[in-house]
Image (cartoon, rainbow, N blue to C red):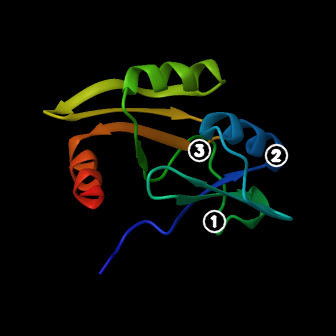
């Protein structure tokens, strides 16, 4: 059974630039650094977000963004979407209401990875239950 996200890994040709960019996005410094890999702990559950040099990718790179989208919960999708764009991300899918309590958007980071953001009532319900 899948028990939760253990690590999300994004790939970048310029690992130093990616580390700087995500330090700005997350507002925290990476806690783990080895050649070819950098890791942050972010969010309410201290999820692991890894940046890996593209030479270690287990597949061939494609010309554009592809693959699955991992959505990170945010309290204000429009504000975070605007902030990511101001930091150099490019719009992939604008802010969309997906149903009561669910709003999404996604961008492509400067390194070609898709970063999803979402307001998700279910996330807030689970967080509240854990804090009780």
Residue 36 percent coordinates (x, y): 81, 63
Instruction: Name the residue rendered at 72%, 58% in the picture.
Output: 31
Q: Dot 1 corresponds to which residue?
A: 59
Q: Dot 3 corresponds to which residue?
A: 113
Q: Residue 73 appears in which quarter of the rendering? A: top left
Q: Dot 2 corresponds to which residue?
A: 14
User: Can residue 33 be seen here?
Assistant: yes
CB-based contact (under 8 Å), mark 3 and mark 2? no
- Local SS, label 2: loop
Q: Nearer the viewer, residue 119 or 29?
A: 29
Q: Which residue in the rendered view is the most extreme toward the left? A: 100
- Local SS, label 3: loop
Q: Residue 98 appears in which quarter of the rendering? A: top left
- Local SS, label 1: loop
Disc nearest the viewer among 3 and 1: 3
For the residues marked 3 and 1, what is the alpha-carbon distance in whole angstroms? 14 Å
Q: Residues within 10 Å of mark 3 (few under 14, many from 20)?
A: some
């Amino acid at each position: 059974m899948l028990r939760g996200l253990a690590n999300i890994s994004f790939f970048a040709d310029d690992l130093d630039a990616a580390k700087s960019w995500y330090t700005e996005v997350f507002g925290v410094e990476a806690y783990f650094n080895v050649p070819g890999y950098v890791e942050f702990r972010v969010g309410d559950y201290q999820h692991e977000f890894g940046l890996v040099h593209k030479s270690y990718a287990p597949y061939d790179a494609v010309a554009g963004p592809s693959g699955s989208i991992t959505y990170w919960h945010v309290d204000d999708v429009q504000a975070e979407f605007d902030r990511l764009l101001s930091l150099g991300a490019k719009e992939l899918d604008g802010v969309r209401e997906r149903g009561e309590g669910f709003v999404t958007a996604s961008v492509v980071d400067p390194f070609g990875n898709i970063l999803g953001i979402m307001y998700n009532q279910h996330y807030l319900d689970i967080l509240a239950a854990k804090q009780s």
